[in-house]
C-alpha cells in the first residue's frame, strides 16, 4: 500500500509502498478513498521535524526534560540511542479519513460498510488503515467519501460547541477562521446561534459570510468594539477560539468581548498566558475542549472498544463523529465550499509544500485521493537489502519495533554470527524505520512471515506482554529457537501452552532476565560461592509511578508484578542458585493514596535451598533515588549492590568496594545466547527456572488478592 510519512531528522515528506496493517482484534481494516490534510495541526507537526536540533530544544522543553530524566535513569549510552532512534525514524501523517471496510473484527461493522475514521494513531494518509471500532462511524447514504473525510475536524469543532453549552439565539464569536473555525461557524448556525467570525485574512471572512456568519471582523484588539456592537453592547455569550498561533492575543481579546459569566472555549492551539483581571472582574469560565469528545485518550474506550453508557455520556467522540455526518447528510453544513485542492496521494509531498508556505497559492481544505488497487491488501514483506543469508550466519526474525528493543536489544544483537533477516511489527511506518536503521533484509506487518521463512533460525520477541506466550508457542512449534523479553506468559493456561511447545519442539528458549548477567551480579554470585548456608536477600526497587492509562497498568497486559517484578525474583533465584517454592505478597492500601494495587508491594519469596528474599517494589519513592538496591547476607558475609554502579563486599572486618558502569546485563545475556547458538549448547537459563519464576509472579498476584501465602508445586 502507499503511505505518507515524514523523516523526523531531515523533515522530508515521503510517499512509499509499505506492507498493509492487519485487521485489529475488535476493530476494522479500512481501504481509504479520501483523507483530509488538517493544515493547522499537520503544518505544526511537519514544521517541528524541519527545525534544527537547537531550535527544537528551545521550543520543546518537555522533550528536553525527558532526555535529562533518561540521562539520570539510563545513562549516556542508552539515552543517546533513544535520541538517535527517534531522530532517524519516520512518522506517519494524517488523522482524518474515509473509506470502506475490507475486513472486520467487530459486529459493529460489516465488510463493505462506508466509514469515516479518526485518530492520530490509526487514521493515516495511507491506502489501508487498521482502526479501532470506536474511532469509526458509518457514513450516511448520500454523503461522499470526500465530505466524510472532514469528520475528525467536524467532531473537534462540535465538541467545542458542546463545551460552550449554547442556546437558541445566543451570540457567539469564533476567533480563527481556518478549517476548524469555518466548520464551527456552520455548526453554530445549525444550532440557532448568532455568529460573528474573526480572522486576520479577509478571504476567510468572506468565506465565513458565505457559510452563514451573521457578521465578521478583522481579528485585532480593535475588533472588540465591533463585537460589542454585534451583541447590542452586552458582550457575546461565548467565544470559541479556533485559531492556531503561539500568540496570547486571541485569548486576551476573547476575554474583552465576552459578557460577564460568559464561556471562553479554547479549541485550537493558542497562547495560554491567562490574565487574571478579566476573569476576576467578569467571573468568566475558561474551558479547554478535548479534541473529538469524551473517550479521547482513554485506552479503554479507544483501543479496547469499551463504550460509555449512552444514558450518562450522551456525546462521545464516536457519537460526535456520527452527528457531524448526519448534519452533512441533511444539508445543514457544507464541506464542498471548504475544499480548495484535490491531490492524488502519489503527489502528497506537493500538498505539504503548499501548507508550509513554499508557494503563493492560497489553500484551505486539501483532500487526498487514492487509486483503487487490489494490491493494497498486501501485508507481504518489503525488501530492504538484497542477497541471501550467509551460510555461516544465523538468520534472525525479530518481532516488535518499540523503543526498548531499539535501545537495549537490537544494538547488542549486531554480531558477526547474526543476520538481521526479517523484522515484523504492527505499524508499517515504524517497522520500516527500524528495519532501515538496523539493516534488516525485509520487514512485514505479519508475524507469521517469520515462521514461514526457512532461513530464520532464531525468533526474538519484544512486543507487548499479552502477545508473548502466543508468539513463543508459535515460534517453538515452527522449529525456531526463541528469545522473548519478560514476561514469558501472563496466565497459568498460557504457561501450560508454552510448556507443551517447549517439550514437544525440542527448541531452545530464553527469557530476557538480563540482570543475572550484569557484572555486579556475577561478582556478587562469585562472592557467595561455596557457601553452605542459605542467603537472606532484600531487593528494593524504586519503580516510579506510572499513570493508570499507561499500557502496563492494563490488566490485559498482566500488571506490574508479572510484567516487571519477575526480573527481581529471577535475580534472587540466581544468587540463591535455587528456584522459588513459596510466595507471600502484601501491598499498601489506602483510600487516600492514588495507587494501583500493584504499585507499592512487598513480595516475600522462599527458595528451594532455604534462602529467603523480599522484593520491595515501590512506586511512591523520590525520583532522585536510584532505581535498584540489593542486599544479600549469608555466612558472615554481606554484599550491597546500588543501581548497578557500585558493589560493596563485606566479610569480617574487611570490605571491597567495586565500581561499574550501570549496565544491567543486556549485552552479556545476548552474547551468552549467541554463543549457545554458535556452538550448539543450551541457552544460559534453564527452562525449569524460567517456568518457576513465571509461576512465582502468578503466585504473588494471587497472594496479594487473597492475603494468603502461596506454595508452588
Image (cartoon, rainbow, N blue to C red):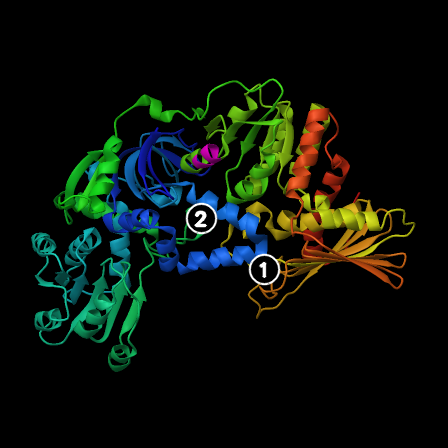
> What is the x, y in percent for residue 165?
25, 65
Q: Quadrant of residue 508?
A: top right
Look at the magenta stretch and give its main secondary structure: helix
Q: Is residue 277 above or below residue 393?
A: below
Q: Nearer the viewer, residue 504 or 519?
A: 519
**The disc label shown at residue 583, or none:** none
Residue sitting at x 59%, y 65%: 624
Disc 1 crowd, CA 10 A, few/some/many (<14, 14-19, 20+): some
Which quadrant of the figure contains the C terminus? Answer: top right
Give SS at disc 1. Answer: loop
Q: Which residues are magenta?
A: 433-437
Residue sitting at x 78%, y 49%: 523
Q: Which residue is disc 1 drawn over?
A: 544
| Residue 148 seen in render | no
Residue 706: within the magenta? Answer: no
Disc 2 crowd, CA 10 A, few/some/many (<14, 14-19, 20+): some
User: What is the CA distance from the residue labelled 2 to the residue labelled 1?
Assistant: 28 Å
Q: Nearer the viewer, residue 232 or 430?
A: 430
> What is the x, y in percent for residue 138?
29, 40
Which quadrant of the figure contains the N terminus? Answer: top left
Q: Quadrant of residue 164?
A: bottom left
Q: Which residue is disc 2 drawn over?
A: 306
> What is the x, y in percent for residue 238?
21, 68
Q: Is residue 627 left or right of residue 574?
A: left
Question: Which mark lies nearer to you, 2 or 1?
Answer: 1
Sequence-wise, which precedes: disc 2 or disc 1? 2
Amino acid at each position: 500500500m502507499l503511505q505518507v510519512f515524514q523523516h523526523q531528522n531531515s523533515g522530508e515528506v515521503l510517499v512509499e509502498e509499505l506492507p498493509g496493517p492487519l485487521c485489529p482484534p475488535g476493530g476494522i481494516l479500512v481501504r481509504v478513498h479520501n483523507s483530509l490534510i488538517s493544515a493547522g495541526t499537520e503544518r505544526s507537526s511537519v514544521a517541528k521535524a524541519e527545525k534544527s536540533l537547537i531550535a527544537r530544544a528551545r521550543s520543546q522543553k518537555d522533550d528536553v526534560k525527558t532526555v535529562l530524566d533518561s540521562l539520570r535513569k539510563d545513562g549516556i549510552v542508552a539515552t543517546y540511542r533513544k535520541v538517535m532512534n527517534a531522530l532517524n525514524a519516520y512518522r506517519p501523517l494524517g488523522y482524518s479519513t474515509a473509506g470502506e471496510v475490507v475486513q472486520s473484527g467487530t459486529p459493529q461493522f460489516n465488510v463493505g460498510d462506508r466509514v469515516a475514521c479518526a485518530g492520530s494513531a490509526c487514521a493515516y494518509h495511507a491506502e489501508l488503515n487498521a482502526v479501532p471500532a470506536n474511532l469509526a462511524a458509518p457514513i450516511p447514504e448520500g454523503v461522499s467519501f470526500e465530505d466524510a473525510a472532514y469528520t475528525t475536524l467536524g467532531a473537534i469543532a462540535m465538541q467545542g460547541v458542546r463545551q460552550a453549552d449554547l442556546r437558541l439565539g445566543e451570540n457567539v464569536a469564533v476567533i480563527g477562521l481556518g478549517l476548524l473555525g469555518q466548520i464551527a461557524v456552520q455548526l453554530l448556525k445549525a444550532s440557532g446561534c448568532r455568529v460573528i467570525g474573526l480572522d486576520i485574512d479577509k478571504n476567510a471572512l468572506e468565506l465565513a459570510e458565505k457559510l452563514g456568519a451573521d457578521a465578521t471582523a478583522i481579528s485585532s484588539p480593535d475588533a472588540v468594539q465591533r463585537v460589542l456592537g454585534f451583541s447590542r453592547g452586552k458582550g457575546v455569550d461565548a467565544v470559541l477560539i479556533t485559531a492556531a498561533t503561539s500568540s496570547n492575543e486571541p485569548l486576551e481579546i476573547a476575554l474583552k468581548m465576552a459578557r460577564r459569566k460568559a464561556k471562553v472555549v479554547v479549541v485550537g492551539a493558542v497562547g495560554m498566558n491567562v490574565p487574571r483581571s478579566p476573569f476576576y472582574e467578569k467571573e468568566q469560565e475558561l474551558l479547554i475542549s478535548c479534541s473529538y469528545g469524551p473517550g479521547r485518550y482513554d485506552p479503554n474506550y479507544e483501543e479496547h472498544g469499551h463504550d460509555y453508557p449512552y444514558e450518562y455520556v450522551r456525546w462521545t467522540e464516536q457519537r460526535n463523529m456520527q452527528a457531524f455526518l448526519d448534519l452533512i447528510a441533511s444539508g445543514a453544513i457544507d464541506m464542498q465550499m471548504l475544499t480548495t485542492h484535490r491531490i492524488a496521494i502519489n503527489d502528497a509531498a506537493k500538498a505539504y509544500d503548499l501548507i508550509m508556505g513554499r508557494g503563493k497559492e492560497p489553500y484551505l481544505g486539501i483532500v487526498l485521493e487514492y487509486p483503487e488497487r487490489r494490491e493494497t491488501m498486501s501485508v507481504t514483506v518489503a525488501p530492504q537489502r538484497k542477497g541471501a543469508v550467509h551460510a555461516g550466519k544465523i538468520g534472525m526474525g525479530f518481532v516488535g519495533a518499540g523503543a526498548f528493543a531499539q535501545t537495549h536489544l537490537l544494538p547488542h544483537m549486531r554480531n558477526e554470527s547474526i543476520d538481521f533477516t526479517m523484522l515484523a511489527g504492527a505499524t508499517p511506518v515504524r517497522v520500516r524505520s527500524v528495519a532501515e536503521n538496523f539493516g534488516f533484509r525485509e520487514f512485514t506487518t505479519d508475524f507469521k512471515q517469520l515462521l514461514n521463512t526457512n532461513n530464520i533460525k532464531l525468533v526474538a520477541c519484544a512486543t507487548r506482554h499479552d502477545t508473548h506466550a502466543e508468539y513463543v508457542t508459535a515460534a517453538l512449534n515452527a522449529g525456531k529457537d526463541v528469545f522473548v523479553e519478560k514476561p514469558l506468559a501472563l496466565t497459568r493456561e498460557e504457561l501450560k501452552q508454552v510448556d507443551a511447545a517447549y517439550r514437544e519442539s525440542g527448541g531452545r528458549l530464553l527469557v530476557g532476565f538480563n540482570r543475572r548477567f550484569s557484572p555486579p551480579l556475577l561478582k556478587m554470585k562469585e562472592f557467595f560461592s561455596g557457601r553452605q548456608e542459605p542467603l537472606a536477600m532484600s531487593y528494593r526497587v524504586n519503580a516510579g509511578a506510572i499513570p493508570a492509562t499507561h499500557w502496563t497498568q492494563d490488566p490485559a497486559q498482566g500488571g506490574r508484578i508479572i510484567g516487571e517484578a519477575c526480573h527481581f525474583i529471577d535475580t534472587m533465584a540466581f544468587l540463591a542458585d535455587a528456584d522459588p517454592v513459596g510466595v507471600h505478597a502484601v501491598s499498601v492500601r489506602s483510600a487516600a493514596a492514588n495507587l494501583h494495587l500493584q504499585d507499592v508491594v512487598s513480595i516475600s519469596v522462599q527458595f528451594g535451598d532455604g534462602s529467603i528474599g523480599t522484593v520491595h517494589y515501590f512506586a511512591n519513592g523520590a525520583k532522585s533515588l536510584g532505581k535498584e538496591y540489593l542486599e544479600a547476607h549469608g555466612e558472615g558475609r554481606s554484599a550491597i549492590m546500588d543501581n548497578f554502579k557500585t558493589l560493596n563486599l563485606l566479610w569480617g572486618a574487611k570490605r571491597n568496594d567495586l565500581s561499574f558502569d550501570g549496565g544491567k546485563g543486556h549485552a552479556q545475556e545476548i552474547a551468552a545466547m549467541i554463543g549457545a547458538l554458535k556452538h550448539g549448547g543450551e541457552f544460559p537459563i534453564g527452562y525449569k527456572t524460567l517456568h518457576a519464576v513465571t509461576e512465582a509472579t502468578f503466585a504473588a498476584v494471587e497472594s496479594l488478592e487473597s492475603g494468603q501465602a502461596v506454595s508452588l508445586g
